[in-house]
Image (cartoon, rainbow, N blue to C red):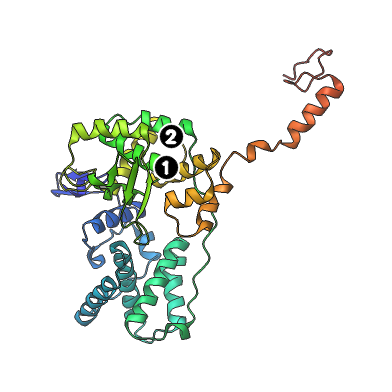
Amino acid sequence: MYIKKLPDVKWSQTHKTFYVPLTSKNKQELFQHLRIKNWFVDYDQLRIDRKHKVDKINSIKLPVLTEHQKLDLERFKKWLQQKRLSQNTVNTYLEVTTFFIRYCLLKSTTNYSVRLIESFNYDFIVRENKSISYQNQCINGIKKYLEYKGIEIEQLNLKRPKKEKRLPMVLSLEEVKQLLDATHNLKHKTLLSLIYSAGLRIGEAINLKVNDIDSKRMLIHIKGAKGKKDRYTLLSSSFLELLREYYKTYKPKKYLFEGQVKEQYSSTSAQKILRSAANKIELKKPITPHTLRHSYATHLLENGVGLRHIQELLGHAKPETTMIYTHVARKDLLEIASPLDIAVKQLSKKLNWNKNSYYPENKTRKSVY
């Protein structure tokens, strides 16, 4: 039942099992979906059919872990948990370290040198065209493992690559309204409206509990957010009306948004309903639930809210993180005139041109067709 929540999952009557097409995107969604339940995939059990020869050429088959290494990784996992890292971070570091140790087995070495780590980095990240963000997570995970093993990290001089400075995708007010109007299910509409109206991360929205809503003070209490920080953000009066209707209908007990088979709604489901709404309005922009958070911040800035207040509402640790929205806000850009508009305006006065054309008013237009 849990697997059925993923998009594109189908039932095979022949094999009596659920399946999805074998693509990198589907594998990533499956692994992330299982991680929510703290379930892990044994990569050794994944078998690729001969028709997928390209996948075999572009990947290296790694040896299986020994029992001793499996026990060591289990101790490493507990060590990470004692550091009070988030469960997602623990899962990522454990996954990366497992790959790295198996790579060391392939190279028949336990000498964790910079050369070995660079070789691993190229074979499993650069050559596979993984993101810089994932590459940084890999380096962080390996650093933590070396720290756990008591190896001097500074002597290795491991450097992380710089992230691309990409601007966030932002929706217009009209596009946000169209998305919400296209979402007819009350629970789905309430969830998407909450993310946009309060600028929440998807994890913050699905972790909200009923008593985190303070309608008397018109505040939402976000607990244990990114960086293990609590904060308050604004409760929209328009959203409160929708929330009350939702509460009367669904009567959630603990979490504000509860799933059908478990007490908490899943981030995968949220992504799916947003994708469905985007398809309905034929939105061509690639969006995720986080796009609603970016749009919230940008729209606040365009309406004159100061960066310091936006930083507090979003829960950013550094003002530099919030500054990125100054590059996508339209308010200042709209005050700048294009040189073409200036030229046309000046020439129209000088030559008595019609402002809607490039032809003088006293001349007959000739068809160019």
Residue 240: percent from left, percent from top: 32, 34
Residue 5: percent from left, percent from top: 23, 45
Residue behind mark 1: 292
Locate residue 334: give its quadrant. top right
Dot label at residue 176? 2
Residue under the image location 28 percent in, 76 percent down:
63
Q: Is residue 282 visible?
A: no
Q: Is residue 276 visible?
A: yes
Q: Residues within 10 Å of mark 2 (few under 14, many from 20)?
A: some
In this view of the protein, which residue sits in the foreground, 105 or 354? 354
Query: Which is nearer the N-term, disc 2 or disc 1?
Result: 2
Q: Residues within 10 Å of mark 1 (few under 14, many from 20)?
A: many
The quadrant in which the C terminus is found is: top right
The amino acid type found where label 2 is placed reads Val
**Left-right relation of 91 to 2:** right
Q: CA distance from mark 2 to mark 1?
A: 8 Å
Residue 2: percent from left, percent from top: 18, 49
- Looking at the image, residue 247 lies above or below residue 124: above
Residue under the image location 42 percent in, 63 percent down:
134
Circle 2/circle 1 CB separation < 8 Å: yes
In this view of the protein, which residue sits in the foreground, 12 or 226? 226
Residue 206: percent from left, percent from top: 28, 47
In the rendered image, the residue lying farthest to the front is 216
SS for dot 2: helix
Residue under the image location 48 percent in, 44 percent down:
297
SS for dot 1: helix
The amino acid type found where label 1 is placed reads Leu
